[in-house]
Amino acid sequence: ANFTAAVLAVAQPLLEASDGGAFLLFTSHRALRAAAALLREAAWAGGWPLLVQNDAPREQLRRRFRGSGRAVLLGTASFWEGVEVPGAALRLVLIDKLPFAPPDDPQVRARSQYLQSRGMNAFRDYQLPEAALALKQGVGRLIRSEDDRGVVAICDPRLLTRGYGRALLSSLPPMRPTRVLEEAVQLLQRCARELPAGRRAEDSTRPTPGAAAAAGGPA
């Protein structure tokens, strides 16, 4: 719960800059539920339609997200891939943790034991490539064409503090990385200004700006 609260502290200035138009992707249903509860109680998040996985069918949530232009959608595994929202409706993708499969998952444990029995490294040869693929798919929600722009924020410090972080970064589409919050905020503000009339913040109630630190990279 504390980590999820920290993730939302990162999300707040980014969401305010983008005026919604965001996917918040989580690696567990527990974190998803905690984030949804916190956002529903947060006064600063009241200005955007909040769409939460399992509140409606996935395709219905996607249509509502695209039609709004300012919605914030919370999802887990099934929203990391196969959900297409090209164009300005999606400007921000925030990922809470690196998508490593739980080591106590029976399938993961069996596969790892098999690889180890053959003298292979289960983490290097199985878990890391699977996480790289999942992360690439999550990031790919934002970049669907050469014309798409926005920010991907990855909140897991292991991306920068662990040796495997470089391998994960190298698996992603070309993006300009930054750890400077203001750079990401400025890009998102430009993206929000490009929204069609009727979808901008001045057409509704805009949340009060706040401050936090962010990790991620603008496309």
Image (cartoon, helix red, strand yellow):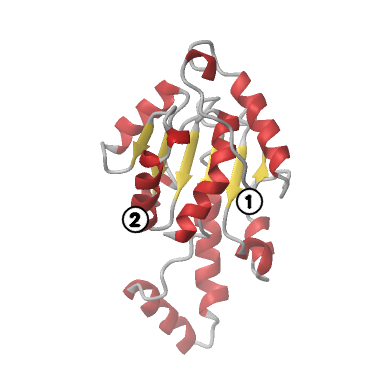
Q: Considering depth in this image, is 46 or 183 the residue closer to the camera?
A: 46
For residue 57, above or below residue 112: above
Q: How many marks?
A: 2
Image mark for residue 65 = none
Q: Within 10 Å of the Cα at label 1, are there few (<14), some (14-19), or many (20+) other Cα atoms?
A: some
SS type, badge 2:
helix
Splitting the image into 4 quarters, where does residue 18 fall? top right
Q: Within 10 Å of the Cα at label 2, are there few (<14), some (14-19), or many (20+) other Cα atoms?
A: few
Q: Amino acid at mark 2?
A: His
Q: Amino acid at mark 1?
A: Leu
Q: What quarter of the picture does the C terminus occupy?
A: top right
| Chain-order first, disc 2 or disc 1 | 2
**Does any portion of residue 144 appear in the rendered image?**
no
SS type, badge 1:
loop
Q: Residue at x 49, y 59 (%)?
A: 3
Tag 2 residue: 29
Splitting the image into 4 quarters, where does residue 165 fall? bottom right
Expressed as whole percent of the image width and height from the top left, the position of residue 168 reads: 62, 60
Q: What quarter of the picture does the N terminus occupy?
A: bottom left
Tag 1 residue: 172
- Image-based side of 96 in relation to 105, left or right: right
- Image-based side of 77 in relation to 127, left or right: left
Expressed as whole percent of the image width and height from the top left, the position of residue 36 reads: 36, 45
Expressed as whole percent of the image width and height from the top left, the position of residue 118 reads: 49, 87
Expressed as whole percent of the image width and height from the top left, the position of residue 214 reads: 63, 48
